[in-house]
Amino acid sequence: MAQEREKLGGTSEEEDEEEMEMDVKEEEDEDEDEEENKSTAMIVGVEGDKEMSGGDRFYRGEGQMSGVRRCRPKEEKERTKLRERHRRAITARILAGLRRHGNYNLRVRADINDVIAALAREAGWVVLPDGTTFPSRSQAARPAGAPSNSAITSPSSHMAPAQTPPATLRGVSSGFRSLVEYQPCRLKGVFVPNSASAYDGSRSRTAAMLGDRGERADNSPLIGSCMDTLDDKQLGVINMKCELVDPDGLLKQLRILKSVNVDGVMVDCWWGIVEAHAPQEYNWNGYKRLFQIVRELKLKLQVVMSFHECGGNVGDDVCIPLPHWVVEIGRSKPDIFFTDREGRRNPECLSWGIDKERVLRGRTALEVYFDYMRSFRVEFDEFFEDGIISEIEVGLGPCGELRYPSYPVKHGWRYPGVGEFQCYDQYLMKSLRKAAEVRGHSFWARGPDNAGTYNSQPHETGFFCDGGDYDSYYGRFFLGWYSQVLVDHADRVLSLAKLAFEGTCIASKLSGIHWWYKTASHAAELTTGFYNPCNRDGYASIATMLKKHGTALNFTCVELRTLDQHEDFPEALADPEGLVWQVLNAAWDVCIPVASENALPCYDREGYNKILENAKPMNDPDGRHLSAFTYLRLSPVLMERHNFLEFERFVKRMHGEAVLDLQS
């Protein structure tokens, strides 16, 4: 144990002091080298014999300049060395104390940057390897397309205690310290299926939407049970070695959830953890233990096949990269990643251009995804047979969503920028050239050269402005190809998922790109892969594809109000209400189940009423409504008395209970 702690924590104070002395010795050597360089520089200056300026001994000779600093007295150099020794000694003691008492994972030769980064992460900030720092999702609002946090629902009979649960690095704990000591875990959301029959023998989520006779009324139950979502992070539920961290603490948390009638948990199974080190070497140990605990408590599981990286987007405060062996391949073959016009690679997920390319040590990307899903299905067969695992959500792109990574924070995107097209890796460009040749216009085998940058606005570009090139012959060809690549990728992956998880409900997630929706081009949607300008329905083809595989659609931002967006970001010309209505109707028209979740924290009655309005439209003649809703997330703000009472009222209405419309 001590050896492992030393490996993680670094070295002892004595070793730190030895390193400090070595660094000072290096500094003395540098001073000696500096003296030699000064002498040489002075000689060069004298030989040049062109010009000399007094105090700084500045020489110019034969077209070159040699600068020589003033020679420091020996006493001054000694004082500098003493100050440096003193500074380094203090640093060594600080690092040793942080390692020993703070459990900070600092490297052996950590510097002040490492200390600042560790303290920032402890305070809930996100610090990326390149130094980029931004608030975690618990500290800042985010656009609807960004990854979301989650929370815990409670039955209507449960009252909020006086204490509020302390927040963890991501999400919050499911219990209070006065009830149980816990290891923080990443709680991503609350899934609420629409009736108790959602987990009976029926395989269809649609069947669970209806009453005994398939009839619907305003107070018919939309939600009859609750499911909490549980993600894994490096110091949370599952670590990078795929080990279950603090099973006793986790068991206490899940018992609290069970006591408030939560139906189950949702878990991300990260590709970067399970198949981390070598192809087809899967380590499911931590997940197996986690699933056993869930089963013992008679909870249900919804599992996400997460083939993307976690970290680098708005709201990400942990880092779970792609498998190491994939990253190694990417160093020599960077075109396996999505690429923008400037050639910047995005290692968040694999480019769809390699779906059928054998570049992953003899396998295609599709084969890699299928092998992973098949391994999961075989490994956890008993959980499928017992009905513990009720649904599989298949990750189809960045953040697990079906979209291009067109607005990456790591590349400088900020809301409400239009984003950039991500089709410049060699494999997608090869596909574009082939499509242009088939069309008979080889010169169309290029991306738009007037589409602006990540943070451009539509009217600033020649491509997205009103009457712009997006609606030209070339623009329609390019956008048609770009969006079809997205649909084809989802079609292929879901075909394999259906094969791997035969008989199990499958879902996929679609991001809500609502900014610039009121413009003619819908620029942000176009770069994301949704060909949805004002004169075309870009979601119908996606819904038809999902229908083909019997896949449910999970959509975001149902709580957002267009008026609020106009007040906060009037320049974004956003319309989340219009977008939600379009997507829901596209799915309902082909009769596939639609689930949803809120994109931003929601505590007020107006927001809850907007969710209910979208969940159960009052005037829909066909009685169509959401099959499920995921509430994001529990926080100390939610647990404040007034906010919790509003949330309790919302849950009752989602259950179909009659609630007096009185302000509390």
Image (cartoon, grey):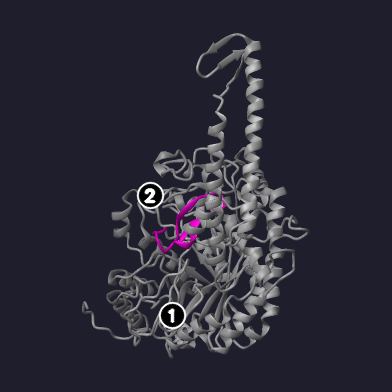
Which residue appears at 46% of the width and 85% of the height? Answer: 256
Give the numbered dot on residue 519. Answer: 2
Left or right placement of residue 103 versus residue 358 in this view: left
Residue 102, placed above or below residue 528: below
Place of residue 530 in the rendered image (x, y in percent of width and height, measured from the top left): 50, 56
Instruction: Give the extent of the magenta segment.
Output: 121-142
Give the residue number, with chain letter if any, for mark 1: 175
Q: Is residue 503 visible?
A: no
Main SS of residues in magenta: loop
Let me know if residue 30 is in the magenta part.
Answer: no
Place of residue 619 in the rendered image (x, y in percent of width and height, measured from the top left): 32, 74
Q: Spot the residue most to the front.
A: 75
Q: Amino acid at mark 2?
A: Thr
Q: Secondary structure at mark 2?
A: loop
Place of residue 253 in the rendered image (x, y in percent of width and height, measured from the top left): 49, 81
For the C terminus, which image quadrant?
bottom left
Q: Secondary structure at mark 1?
A: loop
Q: CA distance from mark 2 to mark 1?
A: 45 Å
